[in-house]
Amino acid sequence: MHPIRFDYTNVMSPAVGVHGLGEKELLSLAEPSARALAAVLARRTKDLRWLDLPYQDALRREILDYAASVRGRFENVCVLGIGGSALGNTALHSALDDPYHDLAPKAGRPRLFVLDNIDPEWMASFLANVDPAKTVFNVVSKSGTTAETMSQFLILRAELVRRLGEKGHRENLVITTDESKGVLREIVRRDGYRSFCVPDGVGGRFSVLSEVGLVSAALVGIDIEALHAGAAAMDQRCRTSKLLENPALLHAALQYGLHTWRGLSMSVTFAYSHRLRNVADWYAQLLAESLGKKLSRAGQTVHRGPTPIRAVGVTDQHSQVQLYAEGPFDKWFTLLAVEEPTAEVTIPRAYPDLEAVAYLGGRTLGQLFHAEREGTRIALTEAGRPNAQFVLQRIDAHAVGQLIYLLELSVAVMGEHYDVDAFDQPGVEAGKIAAYALMGRAGYEQRRAEIEARTRGPKRIL
């Protein structure tokens, strides 16, 4: 198995000039980084149990046994979840299954749908085109109070009961929720659904390597043992407190330094692999929800946090790179690169008298893809834009496990640098409470009255 490489050459000032970091600046973060790592790792057996997920052998066996027990019985797997209960599932599926898996699944492997929105047009179309009786639904919510997920559950449960009966429908539902408390756990007790647990100390955006991400992954045939093995390998690699030997520490320090000292407040993850495009989406939530905070841990108003942006190479070379190369100096870039594609396509030779196309003949798409990626790196570097890259030798479960764990640990360490709580989400909760009030949930009458009073003023609508 090949370790991920982190190339940060073009983040440093010798490569990109005044917008990069100097060697002394970077090394000044060595001691703070060591302290930050120690603070995070000290919590691994307490409230940050996601750090130990790669070592949960019994959990993997339980999930694999369940996947084997239903293999061949369903044409579809559908995840009902949102945010951290969905983005990781999508990222694993797009990275580790065939890009056209859902059009032509291999024998015994169902298609995967992740319903991470409640747009009624989307849900109505799903009901019209996917047979619920041939689908196993994985309902994912730790609390069971997530309005979006629970509304989906109620809709699809009713449809399953109508089609399969009060008893027969239970085979089509598997619940992933809190081990002992919450509405979904009570529903499991009442109706006898098969269930898995969201462990304490594993927040939603850090949960992809837990039951939250692994159940759907195993059901569609992803190698969850290799995924955990890769994460464990990265965990061992990142135990060192030496800044220049620990890729998670280094990534966190570079992000913090470029933001704090150079004003580069936007973090662009440029996935030069179509299969990794949704890993960039997953990382956007991880970064934004963990670090975008109004208050410091001491309660001071700070309004901190970088803004994540996702880009896909080469697609977004033709839509975003103009801004990146010549727009404001407010961004830094992390490219996700793959050295060895799992397939190759040769470009035929034709039109030898037309040099604008003739030079492509006999080359491969992989060569062109590599040249396009290097061209972007060169353009960004020559424009003075700091850019680093994570290099995977190939995309497989072991490599993806490494990358996920590295980014999770990096963000946790960044929370220490920014002095914010990287594991809460008060801004998200405020929106949820407002939605509960507007939907008439009992106990939120006062909040509804406040909202109605605030919106009685004059409207300005064109």
Image (tube, helix red, strand yellow):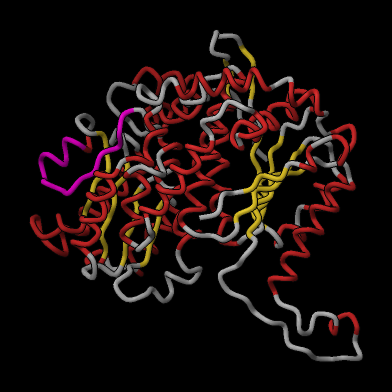
Residue 431 in the magenta stretch? The answer is no
Q: Is residue 189 magenta?
A: yes
Q: Could you say which quadrant of the image residue 341 lies in?
A: bottom right
In this image, 315 relative to 68: left or right? Answer: right
Q: Position of residue 460 (x, y in %)?
A: 65, 32
Residue 177 at x, y = what percent?
27, 38
The segment highlighted magenta reads 185-200
Q: Residue 146 sits in which quadrant?
A: top left
Q: Is residue 44 left or right of residue 173?
A: right
- Residue visible at 62% across and 27% down? 242
Q: Quadrant of the C terminus?
A: top right
Horizontal side, residue 451 vs residue 240: left or right: left
Q: Is residue 196 above or below residue 330?
A: below
Going 38% across and 48% down the picture, which residue do you hit?
213
Query: Residue 20 versus residue 419: which sits nearer the camera?
Result: 20
Compared with 143, 155 (above or below) is below
In the image, residue 381 sits, relative to residue 289, either above or below, namely below
Residue drawn where x is 80% and y is 23% of the image: 24
For the residue pair 270 and 173, the one nearer the viewer reads as 270
- Pick whichever, 437 or 207, lies toward us: 207
How many marks overall?
Answer: 0
Residue visible at 50% across and 41% down? 234
Q: Residue furthest left?
A: 167
Residue 95 coordinates in the image, percent (x, y)? 50, 59
Q: Quadrant of residue 19?
A: top right
